Image (spheres, rainbow, N blue to C red):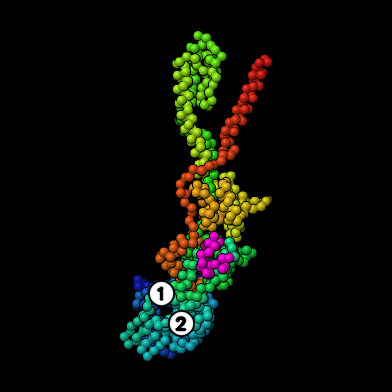
Amino acid sequence: MFIKSRNTERKLYDVTSIPIEPKMNILYTFFSIIHLRTILGIDMITIDFIKQFVENEQAPTFLILCNICWRPDLQVTLMKNLTRSGCSSASLDTKSKYHDHYTMFLLDAHCPGFDDVIASAISRKLFATPYRWLILDDRQHELHPDWPMYSDSDVVVAQRTEDGYKMTEIHKPSNSSSMVYYPRGYYNATTATLADTRPSRTLFRRRRDVMGAPITMSNVIQDSNSTQYHLPREDRLELQYDVVAKVCWVNVKIAFEMLNATPRYIFSHRWGYKQRGEWDGMINDLHTGNAELGTNCLVSDPQRLSVITYTDTLSSFRVRFIFRQPPLSYVSNIFSLPFSSSVWVAVAVCAAIATAAFYVTSKWEAKGGTSPTQLDGSMGDALLLTMSAVSQQGCVLEPRRVSGRIMLWIFFAALMALYAAYSANIVVLLQAPSKSIRTLAQLANSKLTIAANDVDYNHFVFKLYPDPVRVAISKRLEPEKGRGQFYDIKDGVERIRQGLFAFHSIVEPVYRQIEKTFLEYEKCDLVEVDYLNGFEPLVPVKKDSPYLELLRIVFKQIRESGIQSAVNRRMQIPKPHCSGQVAAFSSVGILDLKPVMLLMVYGTLLSVGILFVEILFGRL
């Protein structure tokens, strides 16, 4: 029978006709909830004790009578008493697994089939959270010490006394530990009162002392085997290798001390991926029970959720593409950028006006005679003089009169100031980085070399996403023909410094190497682009681990107290800060001068074309 404790409902239903959730239907069928057998010693004291015990839980409760062999009238009396106290039976026809938190099993050790019920509960892992148990037993020797009632179990054994019932809470800190008994309270039949003597109603506060139980952590190391020596000693040496694993271990060891657990560790050389139906690496250690928890990992593979549970983050790290923004000259024509379009239009208008003025002046001067160095009054000579002034080259032809020379001097002076501003802007733009690559799509369409750190996870994560942008990046990283673009940290960081190179890795070891090798001005244009688009890395714990809730709470306490932040700041390096734009020599390559080179090529071709036209015109 299923009895739900709710103060708002006071109706009683025949639950045998109510549809039951498939999972609970199995329990209902196996336990044979009502056995019409008679047993002595069950009276109103027991019924009132059960009613007050359920009320004292102060939580919604589905009460399952497991293999109860009482007389039918006593079972009906129990249900009536629960109904009068605000309890009602209810259907479990729900798709929410969180209703398991309401489930409480009532078991009488005197009824036949007690061992079968216990064996079935063990096989179905019903002694673990979130299920609750109330076992009526006058002979505690029937409770076998090998039963898996660990730190997350909520099992109460009620023993009949002369005055009523004495309640005892039992659990085992670990598989190798003996059963631990804690007084839960007592029920006084004379006064019909139940006293709860628990120091706290929160299970975590009662179970946080695991009494030295060994808890094993699987640590992922991929950079250097020396981590196996430095990690357990916490000597903060060689932090350029596997710093994520070292930070996680320090925080986890603090958590073990808070739980009074004995720390143990093993090492794995990969995070863990499913290949040919089998898990490997750290995930396999958790799946097989060799470890209870592991190193922080990204929530990138949904298949892992079948064998592990994520808790909290202990070592914040990011996996990104890191690169220097390409120079502005690689993505734009810097020779058109110094002035806006309106300035260029104004320069063209001024040049046209100056050409017209020189033409009028030369016409007037030509009436008094000409010389070889004097403008002959044609539009071609006036245009040639104007173009010479614009390009700051000068011309052998010049006005002879004072008015024309004053006009020429003013025009050259104005263009000289314009030329100085233009040249200064060109020098600045040659050294300026662009902001052209900010997203993954822009990176995929850029001309940067795409590469990755040659570690285990980079050979898997690029194959997890089917969208076109990530597929394009994956193909550039690992082409069908040729060698894949994988480098170690030192080579990758050096190529980042040289430019036009995007390197995918955990950012912390990259930034540590950058601090050692980059000049100050080279740190100013570093950019990160996220490929995985994942959440913060979380600590994986073995699914259904009895320490899951204990670890989850102490991890949050470590973070809220500031310990986690202090450990991260002590052992990790943040993104290098740009201390200011420092003047430095910057070489100019052919690619920087591409627009100028194209202009020269087009001008040469145009001049050759004009030459052939002139030759043809002369012969005709």
Q: 454 above or below 152? A: above
Write the residue at 50% across / 47% down.
521
Pick whichever, 68 or 361, lies toward us: 361
Q: Which mark is residue 28?
A: none
Q: In which quarter of the image is residue 288?
A: bottom right
Pick whichever, 195 or 354, lies toward us: 354
Q: The residue under label 2 is which amino acid type?
A: Val
Residue receiving disc 1: 205
Residue 135 falls inside the magenta stretch? no
The answer to which of marks 2 and 1 sits earlier in the sequence is: 2
Q: Distance between the residues labelled 2 and 1?
A: 15 Å
Q: Is residue 548 left or right of residue 267?
A: left
Quarter holding the N terminus is bottom left
Tell me, yes or no, if residue 431 can be seen here. Answer: yes
Q: Is residue 488 left or right of residue 90?
A: right
Tell me, yes or no, if residue 117 can be seen here. Answer: no
Please provide percent x and percent y for residue 20: 48, 72
Q: Residue 180 carries which label?
A: 2
Write the residue at 45% across / 15% down.
402
Which residues are the magenta region? 226-246
Write the residue at 54% across / 62% down.
238
Q: Quadrant of residue 456?
A: bottom right
Please provide percent x and percent y for residue 555: 45, 67
SS state under label 1: helix
Q: The residue under label 1 is which amino acid type?
A: Arg
Q: How crowded is mark 1: few (under 14 residues within 10 Å), some or many (20 or more)?
A: few
Please provide percent x and percent y for residue 185: 37, 82
Q: 373 above or below 66? A: above
